[in-house]
Image: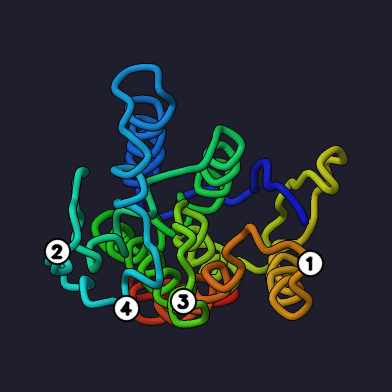
């Protein structure tokens, strides 16, 4: 497993990655204001209602209407909307920081290739695909799914299609900084997700969400990139 530090890949079509920065800021603000307990903490039930819970998504209440006979003492979020809201919640500073670092390194070049507005749509679609993949692979799970990693996996997949030859500085084994070929790093990352799904060595991470988001990013970038943006550049 690797942690990206930076890439050597200047922007071509845009002057600045406004949407990437905005997404990072929004994720951080939501965590600091509502999840950290420092400013305006929300109770656990309300927090969980914004997460994606597969068993609830496929239950009678998936359309957002209260299930008859149940009492709601928290903000009830329609289950279909949790396919969006779950992306903006994180389980801790390490979870948040890791995701935002991936978004910072890979997001700007995908935003450059798609344009600002289409990049936002691309990001959200990858997150939705990740959430749906996770839910369909674990339809009876009661564990809340949170985090931006599914959407960010889509950025990683798109980066592989657009910039496989770029040099990316990564932190290997959490301590060794090395410049590596983007394709090598990303393929190794994807194979690690598949390995975890096959052998289930660690089940606290939504590996299927990462795989679903990655595959969505690979295919979506083919139709959402700007006209004239080359593949495998």
Disc number lying in front (2 or 1): 2
Q: Can residue 230 be seen in this view?
A: no
Q: Which mark is residue 66?
A: 2
Residue bearing the label numbered 3? 140
Q: How far apart are marks 4 and 2 (CA)?
A: 14 Å
Locate residue 159, reporting x and y percent: 55, 65
Which residue is at a point 75% across and 69% down the rendered structure image?
192
Which residue is at a point 33% across and 60% down the rendered structure image?
119
Secondary-structure class at tag 3: loop
Q: Is residue 120 above or below residue 210?
A: above
Locate residue 134, reporting x and y percent: 49, 73
Q: Residue 201 carries which label?
A: 1
Which residue is at a point 33% across and 44% down the rendered structure image?
45
Q: Residue 58 carries which label?
A: 4
Q: Is residue 24 above or below residue 130?
A: above
The answer to whether the residue labelled 2 contacts the one labelled 1, judged by CB atoms less than 8 Å apart, is no
Q: Distance between the residues labelled 1 and 4?
A: 27 Å
Mark 2 packing: few (<14 Cα in 10 Å), some, or many (20+)?
A: some
Q: Nearer the viewer, residue 210 or 21?
A: 210
């Amino acid at each position: 497993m690797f942690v990206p530090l930076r890439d050597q890949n200047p922007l071509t079509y845009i002057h600045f990655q406004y949407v990437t920065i905005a997404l990072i800021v929004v994720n951080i603000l939501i965590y600091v204001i509502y999840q950290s307990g420092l400013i305006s903490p929300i109770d656990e039930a309300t927090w969980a209602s914004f997460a994606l819970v597969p068993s609830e998504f496929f239950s009678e209440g998936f359309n957002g209407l209260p299930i008859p006979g149940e009492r709601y003492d928290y903000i009830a979020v329609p289950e279909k909307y949790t396919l969006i809201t779950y992306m903006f919640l994180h389980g801790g500073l390490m979870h948040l920081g890791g995701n935002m670092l991936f978004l910072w390194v890979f997001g700007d070049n995908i935003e450059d290739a798609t344009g600002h507005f289409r990049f936002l749509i691309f990001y959200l679609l990858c997150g939705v695909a990740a959430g749906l993949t996770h839910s369909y692979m674990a339809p009876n799970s009661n564990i809340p799914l949170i985090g931006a990693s599914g959407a960010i996996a889509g950025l990683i997949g798109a980066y592989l299609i657009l910039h496989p030859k770029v040099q990316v500085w990564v932190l290997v084994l959490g301590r060794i900084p090395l410049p590596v070929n983007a394709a090598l790093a990303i393929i190794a990352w994807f194979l690690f997700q598949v390995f975890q799904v096959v052998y289930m060595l660690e089940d606290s991470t939504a590996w299927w969400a990462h795989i679903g988001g990655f595959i969505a990013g690979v295919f979506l970038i083919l139709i959402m990139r700007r006209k004239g943006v080359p593949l495998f550049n």
